[in-house]
Amino acid sequence: MKKLIIDDAVPFAENIFSHLGEVTLVPGREITSETVKDADALIVRSRTQVNQSLLKNSSVEFVGSTVVGLDHIDQDYLASKNIHFYSAQGCNANSVSEYVISALLHFAEEHGFELSEKSLGIIGVGNVGKLLEQKAIALGMTVFLNDPPRQEKEDLPHFVDLDKALSADIISFHTPLTKDGKYPSHHLLNQNNFHLIHPSTVVINAARGGIIDESVWSKTETDINIIDCWENEPNIDANLYQKADIATPHIAGHALEAKIKGSSMVYEVLCQHWNQPIQSHWKAQVPHPTEPLTASYGDSFQSMLFKLVHHCYDPVIDDLAIRSNEIDEIHKKFEYYRRHYPTHHEWTEFTVKSNRPEVENNRLKALGFKVKLI
């Protein structure tokens, strides 16, 4: 019988993978070379460093990552040993884009400004960036897109350079973390270009820790800081933490649908790799919201949307879950909360009953909601 070692944070792992072999669930940070020695497949999230030291004496022939980041995977080593690797790219893109918009709506309502009057610089226009662009346009925002690798390959004249993107009212980073190649993203925002950011700017990192030089960020005046990704997680920087208006423990992509999509994408590829039929019985165990939402009449579109989104997901709750004046306490809470993250659903799972104008209903659909006219 095949043996599978799976990070215990992968939702519904036993239900999904058990027909393929013997499933053993292990916390990601506790997966060791001894753990995987006799395994045929290894399914991880971001907390397991998959490299030679982990796999050199193992029988692992397939590695699947149910998250989109790749900096925890030594792909060159896997290729050299002919170990099949698959990463669930794009699985949490919608969840992350919703996190960003949820946080922006929170501050727009709290501070009394209209997002439709703001510009948004999206740095990295991949799976997340494209969905964030779509949502921002539905909100009437002016969008500056920056992605040199895409611009070079696809000839996208409407894309802008980094300096232009950094001039936006709101700047949101969505690049992978890379240190090599023509366009490395490590410390993309650093002491040489941080001066381009105005004190009134909103800065968001929901991509990877290390894209922004945190030592510079913590000393630079900015209006609002929304931080989900940090260097040296869970041992995050105390100065930057105190500067954050919303500080969350790398959970922007943790909506239930995102996690399940990552699991199912890896599962289907493993089935193909082992020439096994793809089963779907496990989907009956997945919960879905059953009560529709109502688009309140009489509010502005932004205020109405804030109420809808707030019902689906409130980033302040995730901030408060690790909020403390003691940095050692934050470090402990950071990893615990990730491992025991409460369920929240993406907006795409919700139906909104609405008698708002057609143009607004179309905007709700563009944001991902299902709309039922009343």
Image (cartoon, rainbow, N blue to C red):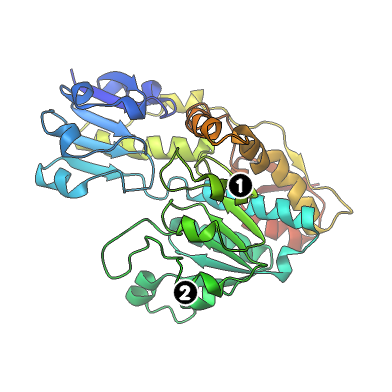
* Residue 3 image offset from top left, x and y in percent: 21, 21
Real-space Cα separation, disc 1 to disc 2, in angstroms: 27 Å
Mark closer to the observer (1, 2): 1
* Residue 319 image offset from top left, x and y in percent: 62, 40
Give the vertical position of 341 relative to 88 (above or below).
above
Mark number, residue 162: 2
Q: Quadrant of residue 116?
A: bottom right
* Residue 372 image offset from top left, x and y in percent: 73, 46
Q: Amino acid at mark 2?
A: Leu
Q: Residue at x 72, y 50 (%)?
A: 106
| Quadrant in the picture for the N terminus | top left
Which numbered disc flags the more N-terminal residue, 1 or 2? 2
Neighbour tally class for label 1: few under 14, some 14-19, many 20 plus, Cα within 10 Å: some
Which residue is disc 1 drawn over? Answer: 242
* Residue 48 image offset from top left, x and y in percent: 31, 35
Q: Residue at x 42, y 28 (%)?
A: 9
Viewed as shown, does residue 277 lie left or right of 248?
left
Q: Residue at x 30, y 21 (%)?
A: 19
For label 1, the SS is: helix
Q: Amino acid at mark 1?
A: Gln
